[in-house]
């Protein structure tokens, strides 16, 4: 009986060790493939949630997989602190073993990232000197021409996701101390602009934008993501 108990304990330890080794290997492989897919400068960190891993692998179903990308760029814009969470991922074990990816599907891909204010300012009209987050909203500070006269002011704007990217829209104007007041109607058209970020990796479309201390915090979501054809 004692020998049997020792054998059971040893086998239990071996299964636990095997499970942890398996999940590390899988996480490294996912990170390697994501880095190659998106030409990332470094391999992202990957965490496969749920214990035990081997049970999920045998069933071909994973509850959630977190991918920490960090900095990411497409042809027009760069973001930082990019994190992607895949939920309810289907990856049949036979397909994994034979490197067939056509049946790999994530029910949902949720991504978050930060668009630095310096990046946003790069798409703003001339005259914009800085963009900061204030108590009453996002502040666009600069010197703007009104009927040929350059007038310093702070414009409070809103940000929203659109089909073309992040739409920036003026909603109020605060004149500089001692300066003349400026009607919003004179700045609304010239100060409205778009930051061309429509989606994040895995085809995740922007759904929410929140000004943060050092950039726009964006959220994006995609549904029924076929991992063999992501772009």
Image (cartoon, grey):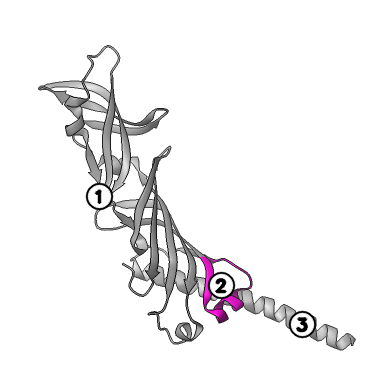
The disc, 2 or 1, on the residue closer to the chain's N-terminal end is 2
**Residue at the spot x=64%, y=79% of the render?**
18
Mark 1 nearby-residue class (10 Å; few <14, some 14–19, many ≥20): some
Residue 113 in the image: x percent, y percent?
A: 40, 51
Residue farthest to the right? 1
**Residue at the spot x=68%, y=76% of the render?**
16
- Circle 2/circle 1 CB separation < 8 Å: no
Q: Which residues are magenta?
A: 48-64
Q: CA distance from mark 3 to mark 2?
A: 21 Å
Left or right: 191 in relation to 63? left
Mark 2 nearby-residue class (10 Å; few <14, some 14–19, many ≥20): some
Position of the C terminus by quadrant: bottom left
**Residue at the spot x=74%, y=79% of the render?**
12
The residue at which mark 2 appears reads as 24
Q: Secondary structure at mark 1?
A: loop
Q: Nearer the viewer, residue 206 or 73?
A: 206
The residue at which mark 3 appears reads as 10
The residue at which mark 1 appears reads as 196
> Looking at the image, can residue 70 be seen?
yes
Left or right: 52 in relation to 132? right
> Looking at the image, can residue 123 be seen?
no
The disc, 3 or 2, on the residue closer to the chain's N-terminal end is 3
Residue 206 is marked as none
- Would you place residue 125 above or below residue 136 in this image? below
- Would you place residue 212 above or below residue 12 in this image? above
- Would you place residue 109 above or below residue 59 in this image? above
Position of the N terminus by quadrant: bottom right
- Circle 3/circle 2 CB separation < 8 Å: no
Q: Secondary structure at mark 2?
A: helix
Q: CA distance from mark 2 to mark 1?
A: 37 Å
């Amino acid at each position: 009986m004692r020998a049997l108990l020792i054998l059971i304990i040893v086998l239990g330890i071996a299964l636990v060790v095997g499970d942890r080794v398996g999940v590390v290997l899988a996480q490294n492989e996912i990170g390697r493939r994501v880095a190659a897919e998106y030409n990332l400068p470094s391999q992202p960190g990957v965490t496969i949630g749920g214990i035990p891993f081997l049970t999920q692998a045998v069933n071909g179903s994973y509850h959630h997989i977190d991918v920490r990308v960090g900095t990411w760029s497409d042809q027009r814009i760069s973001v930082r602190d990019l994190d992607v969470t895949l939920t309810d991922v289907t990856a049949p074990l036979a397909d994994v073993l034979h490197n067939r990816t056509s049946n790999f599907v994530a029910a949902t891909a949720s991504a978050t990232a930060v668009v630095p204010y310096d990046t946003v300012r790069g798409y703003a009209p001339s005259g914009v000197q800085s963009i900061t987050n204030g108590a009453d909203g996002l502040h666009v500070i600069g010197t703007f021409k009104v009927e040929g006269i350059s007038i310093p002011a702070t414009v409070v704007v809103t940000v929203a996701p659109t089909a073309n990217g992040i739409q920036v829209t003026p909603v109020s104007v605060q004149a500089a101390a001692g300066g003349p007041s400026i009607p919003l109607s004179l700045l609304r058209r010239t100060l409205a602009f778009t930051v061309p970020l429509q989606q994040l990796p895995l085809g995740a479309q922007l759904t929410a934008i929140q000004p943060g201390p050092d950039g726009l915090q964006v959220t994006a979501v995609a549904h029924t993501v076929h991992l063999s054809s992501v772009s």
